Amino acid sequence: MPAETGAKRDIRALDLESLRAFFLAHDQQSFRADQVYQWLWQKGAHSFEVMTNLSKATRELLDAYFVINHIAVDRQQRSTDQTVKNAIRLHDGLTVESVLIPTETRSTACVSSQVGCSLDCTFCATSQLKRMRNLNPDEIYDQVMALDSQSRLYFDRPLSNIVFMGMGEPLMNYKNVMSAVDKITEGLAMSPKRITISTSGIPKMIEKLADENPKFQLAVSLHSAQEKVRNEIMPFSTSFDLETLLKSLQYWYHKTRSKVTFEYLIWKGINDTQEAIDALVAYAKKVPSKVNIIEYNPTDSGDFQAADQQVIERYKQALERAKITVTVRRSRGKDIDAACGQLANKLVPLDDKN
Ligand code: SAH
């Protein structure tokens, strides 16, 4: 709809075909659409003005019909370990968070897929926020672009990895996440192998994903292989029992030949028993997988306490004995609430020094 008759449309909601149709309908050659598409999805243009290979008239035409909604980095905080947390303002004023995590050799972008979260994991700060809405593909793409620029600026290298481990459940925003992954891998020429989608475990969606010939990695936040315990700490999981989840993961492996990574937190009095360890080993043996033990980051709820180091060690040894690859991940960005499960839109002052 043109400006005179109503609200302008967000141009990034259009696919290439629709954009071509738009130009044809306005007596312009359809290859203009390809040029615009490149500006939008390869160069990350946020205005029509910068599209210098288009004539002024064409840019004005676009301006009359469309807007380019885009995110803005509202606030930024840097951790003593160099992790950068961004509060991202969306075009409608809502906020999500994105985190840039540097190591010696890598720069990992941790991006959000929803404003708030659809799920209710009791140990996660994000679950305290109501799910407000899904992010659009361009809002996910923009987070990656912003973190890529930050990585170049602060660490002198482009992003090496992208993980969908920020706010939200990516598989509850399936279509937009898939479309964003396309834009990121095609537009930005990022290898899909370096992208990981993390899910709390929605079996139907995992199967759907497996059917689409995905090239990215899959991680599942398991945290317990004991039904009763998992149901307590992740109440939504009562609708998705462990057996059904396992079947979907076996299907995933069958179709993709890619090992799933189980993310696993260990808490005192919840999953620090020998039965819990045995259950995990038995579960992980049933599907080609790796286990990533993540350090628990305290949240405001305060009901959970990280297990002792000895328990982590026992888990590690039991998994290794069963020939399952296990890594123990130290958290990054804890001092600024940027670590896993700590993203809760806490307002942080914009600190120019950082
Ligand atoms: N909803 C998806 C994506 C979020 S990823 C998922 O659950 O996988 C966030 C990761 O951080 C998940 O593995 C989640 O279980 C973990 N996490 C949540 N709260 C945490 C906390 N307080 N400390 C450490 N990790 C946490």
Image: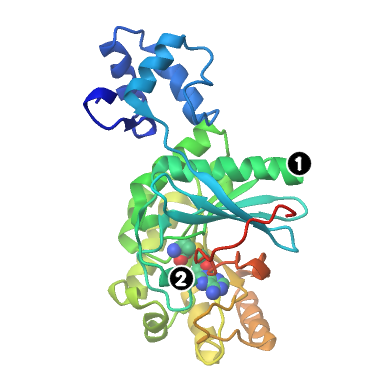
Classify 10 Å Cα crowding around label 1: few (below 14), some (14-19), many (20 and above).
few
Residue 177 % position (x, y): 41, 47
Q: Is residue 274 left or right of residue 118?
A: right
Residue 58 image offset from top left, x and y in percent: 40, 12
- Picture layout, residue 157 above or below residue 311: above
Q: Earlier in the sequence, mark 2 or mark 1?
A: 1
The yes-or-no answer for disc 1 within 8 Å of ligand 1 is no
Q: Choose between 308 and 62: the one closer to the eye.
A: 62
Mark 2–mark 1 Cα distance, whole angstroms, equals 42 Å
**Residue at image x 36%, y 68%?**
119
Circle 2 SS class: loop
Nearer to us in this view, 112 or 240: 112
Quarter residue 145 falls in: top right
234 to the left or right of 325: left
Q: In front here: 238 or 281?
A: 238
The image position of residue 37, as x and y in percent, is 44, 24
Instruction: Please tell me the numbered disc located at residue 286.
Output: 2
Mark 2, Cα crowd under 10 Å, few <14 / some 14-19 / many 20+, is few
Query: Element type at marker 1?
Result: loop
Residue 188, position in %: x, y? 56, 34
Residue under numbered circle 1 = 156
Q: Which mark is residue 317?
A: none
